[in-house]
Image: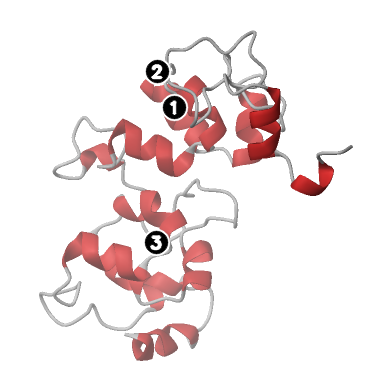
Amino acid sequence: SFNEQFPALSAEGDQPPLAAAPGGGSGGDLFMGQGRDGYMAARVHRRLHAQAAALSDEQLSQLGRLSFNEQFPALGVDGEAVAMTSGAIGAPPVVPAQRPGLAGDPFMGQGREGYMAARVHRKLHTQAATLSDSDLLALGKLSFNEQFPALGLDGGATPVATPMPSPRQPIGQPIGGDLFQGQGRDAYMQGRVHRKLHAQ
């Protein structure tokens, strides 16, 4: 609860906030009846879910007691960065594949498509789909602005190899030579250009 976050603010000395948090929850139920995934969804900042998935149950419970702003430094994450530093929470980082239920899944339970949707800029999904798992993981650790140059693209360029059909054009119809998408000049202008600009 929010009231449990106040004692974490009064932690003294050089102790990391997670190590200084009092108690370990309510006995055996560290997640207050929500389950691990529900607790993480409700109490851990969404940008930290990948790092939080690698934490032990006790560490995740302590992290959830902190405010969102306190969670970033507690995990050793600096705002935009998404890499966890070792020793930031009093224990070495756990490799996500070592957690039960995630063995062999490098995407921490999200699956390849879920990881790409959450961590790769939407304009880069076409290129990212062709990457190997390890390359996709590395790309997902970069900020959106860093992802474009990493794939050899200009940050503002839309990386679409072929023009996309408009919602009014049936799929499979050639786009190349028809500038007005099969509507004719007047119909296209009527539907797509403001009426006050028609005379110009």
Q: Which numbered marker is on residue 196? A: none
**Of residues 128 and 176, the one drawn nearer to the viewer in this rendering:** 176
Q: Secondary structure at mark 3?
A: loop
Q: Residue at x 60, y 51 (%)?
A: 80
In the picture of the structure, the residue carrying the numbered disc 3 is 90
Which residue type does callout 3 highlight? Gly
Whichever of callouts 1 and 3 sits on the residue coming sooner in the sequence is: 3
Q: Secondary structure at mark 2?
A: loop
Quarter of the image with the N terminus in it: bottom left
Which residue type does callout 1 highlight? Leu
Q: Please tell me whether mark 3 or mark 2 is closer to you in this view.
A: 2
> How far is disc 2 from disc 1 in space, using C-alphas?
6 Å
Q: Residues within 10 Å of mark 2 (few under 14, many from 20)?
A: few
Q: Are marks 2 and 1 in contact (CB under 8 Å)?
A: yes
**Splitting the image into 4 quarters, where does residue 59 fall?**
bottom left
- Which x, y percent locates residue 120? 49, 36
- Which x, y percent locates residue 74? 47, 65
> How far is disc 3 from disc 2 in space, using C-alphas?
33 Å
Quarter of the image with the C terminus in it: top right
In the picture of the structure, the residue carrying the numbered disc 2 is 132
Whichever of callouts 3 and 2 sits on the residue coming sooner in the sequence is: 3
**Of residues 14 and 94, the one drawn nearer to the viewer in this rendering:** 94
In the picture of the structure, the residue carrying the numbered disc 1 is 136
**Splitting the image into 4 quarters, where does residue 107 fall?**
top left
Residue 59 can be seen in this image: no
Which residue type does callout 2 highlight? Ser
- Which x, y percent locates residue 199? 86, 38
Relative to 88, 36 lies left or right: left
> How far is disc 1 from disc 3 in space, using C-alphas?
29 Å
